[in-house]
Amino acid sequence: MQKDKVTPAASQGVKRISSRLDGIHESATLKLNALVQAMKARGEDVINLTAGEPDFDVPEAAKAAVLEGVRANHSKYTAVPGIVPLREAIARKTSDAQGIAWNASQVIVTNGAKQALYNAFIALLEPGDEVLIPAPYWLSYPEMVKLAGGIPKFLPTRFEQGFKLTPEQLRSSLGPRVKAIILNSPSNPTGRCIRLKSSKRWVGFLRIRESGSSVMRSMTELFLRLRSFVRF
């Protein structure tokens, strides 16, 4: 009778996944959302406050555009930053919304905000670099920073102060290893918006510090235009 072969790695209990995953935690949002879906499947009456999904359907214009693209056989590989017409449209829309001139060469299309942020962290962070994250925060932020070799550094904010991050708090947190700060406006989960005057003051402050180097700003506006689709 032939015995099953045992590989040296298996016999010695060698771990087969990368150690970079040791400190990464499962998304609490998706874990709770899966629990809610399981409860609903059992017939339980549950109000789901976990995943931040709109309660309306995909707009008809978006559906039609997808079907039109399929019928036109737009299914081939594209340039890494995205197709030029889409990047040009994004540049125009962003320029109109912000009052700042953008062009297609400054636009990269990603599969959502998570990929955009993760790509940025991979490109910017060296092992041990710190990223400032105002708290409360979106749960994926620290996990993406850790996957890229960085260290998340949390800046707690208070309800009594409107979850406002103060210049003094920011100044005291800028150590020599700080490489980036994440600013989310409107904030998920607090809903706080960063005023233009405040953002300009922070940008000027972050450009110059004692070390002479600047801090990269990752500004996400994921929910800024969501109200355009909501009917009250």
Image (tube, rainbow, N blue to C red):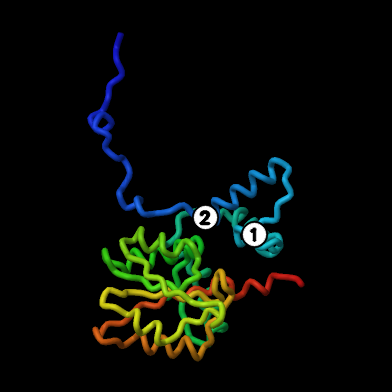
* Residue 105 appears in view: no
Residue beneath label 1, please? 49
Q: Residue furthest top?
A: 1
Q: Amino acid at mark 1?
A: Leu
Q: Provide residue 121's location: percent of width, then percent of height.
A: 36, 66
Q: What residue is shown at x 23% (from left), y 30% (from top)?
A: 8
Q: How many marks?
A: 2
How far apart in space, not on screen, are marks 2 and 1 (Cα)? 12 Å
**Camera-side residue of 128 and 92:** 128
* Residue 112 appears in view: yes
Q: Quadrant of the N terminus?
A: top left
Q: Amino acid at mark 2?
A: Ala
Location of residue 15 with respect to 174 vertically, above or below: above
**Location of residue 43 (image quadrant):** top right
**Camera-side residue of 37 and 84:** 37
Which element is circle 1 on?
loop
Location of residue 176 with respect to 126 vertically, above or below: below
**Camera-side residue of 121 and 137:** 137
Q: What residue is shown at x 34% (from left), y 86% (from top)?
A: 207
**Location of residue 64 (image quadrant):** bottom right
Residue beneath label 2, please? 28
Q: Provide residue 82's location: percent of width, then percent of height.
A: 46, 64
Q: Provide residue 149's location: percent of width, then percent of height.
A: 31, 61
Lower sequence index among marks 2 and 1: 2
Question: Is 186 on the left-hand or right-hand side of 171?
Answer: right
